[in-house]
Amino acid sequence: MARTRYMPLRKARLAAIAFTVAACAAVVAFTAFTATPTGRALEYHSLDWRFATRGERPMPRDIVVVGIDNATDQAIGDRFPYRRSVYADAIDNLTAAGAAAIVLDIQFLESPDIPTAASDDGKLLNAIARSQKVVLATAPDGTNTTPLPFRGLKTTDGNDALAASGAVVGVVPQLVTSDGVIRWIRPREHTHSALGVPIDPSESCPRCITLPSLALAATAVATNTSPFEARGLPDKMMINWRGAAASYASTPTEQGNRVRLHNFAETTAKGVDLSWAHGAIVLIGATDPVSQDLHETPFQDKSAKSSRMPGVEIHAHAIATLADKSFIVSESPRAAGIMLPLLVVLRWAACTF
């Protein structure tokens, strides 16, 4: 009788132990596989397939890309990046229209190749100061440093011109995976830089600073918050793409015409209807292929011939991802590490009780 009663229970426990060992081995093997180039590539392509099968999603009406292309060159009568008074007029007009944030995906760095009149610097800085809604872009320069816009330019009273303007600086932290495709961004970047932004020292890098990404800086300015106060953000996140190139290249108006910088940059354009900018995050940047600011993304365009997208539109997708908190975090190893042991516990409980 005792043999009949306890043998099934003993077999069940042995089966549970075997299941536990197999589950743990599966966790170790799966975690190791996802850490390999093949495993990561499989995860990336599975997400690419998800975007392709899901198709385009509705674009937010409060995120608008203002393009700079050959038509802009012809209308302004100059070649990109243009005199800085052009951007000053654009900032004034967009601010008057009630833009929530004005993001300039243009690096205003002093360079002998780009002569700039002091008066143009002053016009741009004054427009930024009047607006208090401007985000300026910067990017690592290849020497392990991230230069700040205007490179330490001083005001007439000796103060730092960038700090005095009230502009928020956002870094361009696009991360290219091994196959040359941009899928990730870092909401914040730890980098070396000049003084003028909050220091974030650590044992490994005592002179490092933290800069928000251009996307995080834009969402912070639009919501009147500090980009350094944002909580719950991963160190690295996948962009939740809404569509292919040119998805954000139209104004949210009845006509749906493409909007370019020259449509409202000049002072004389103050009579132009800019109602589409009210409450919107407006990004200004190069969209012309000759700008060489094109990058591979998981989405192909409507012709299915290219998946390259201007950097300014990539920022728009990243902003939308942050705004609705739809970012994707690679959690495969962690999910496996949690779910499989949970299954083991449930299996053990079922066998024991």
Image (cartoon, grey):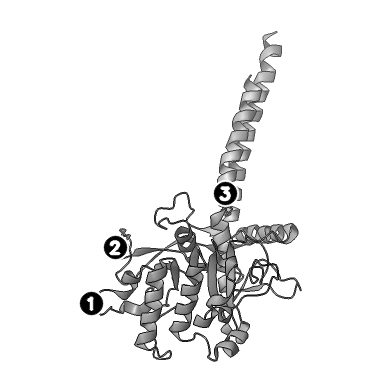
Residue placed furthest toward the top:
1
Mark 2 surroundings within 10 Å by alpha-carbon count, few (fewer than 14), some (14 through 19), many (20 or more): few
Residue 174 picture location, percent across and down: 52, 68
Residue placed furthest toward the front:
271
Residue with the mark numbered 3: 333
Quadrant in which residue 127 is drawn: bottom left
Among the two numbered marks 1 and 3 on one chain, the one whose residue lies closer to the N terminus: 1
Q: CA distance from mark 1 to mark 2?
A: 31 Å
- The amino acid sitting under disc 2 is Pro
Q: CA distance from mark 2 to mark 3?
A: 32 Å
- In the picture, the quarter occupied by the N terminus is top right
Q: Nearer the viewer, mark 1 or mark 2?
A: 1
Q: Is residue 206 left or right of residue 341?
A: left
Total residue callouts: 3
- The amino acid sitting under disc 3 is Pro
Q: Is residue 94 above or below residue 27?
A: below
Q: Residue at x 42, y 55 (%)?
A: 225
Q: Nearer the viewer, mark 2 or mark 3?
A: 2
Q: Are marks 1 and 2 in contact (CB under 8 Å)?
A: no
Residue with the mark numbered 1: 157
Residue with the mark numbered 2: 206
The answer to whether residue 306 of the structure is visible from this angle is yes
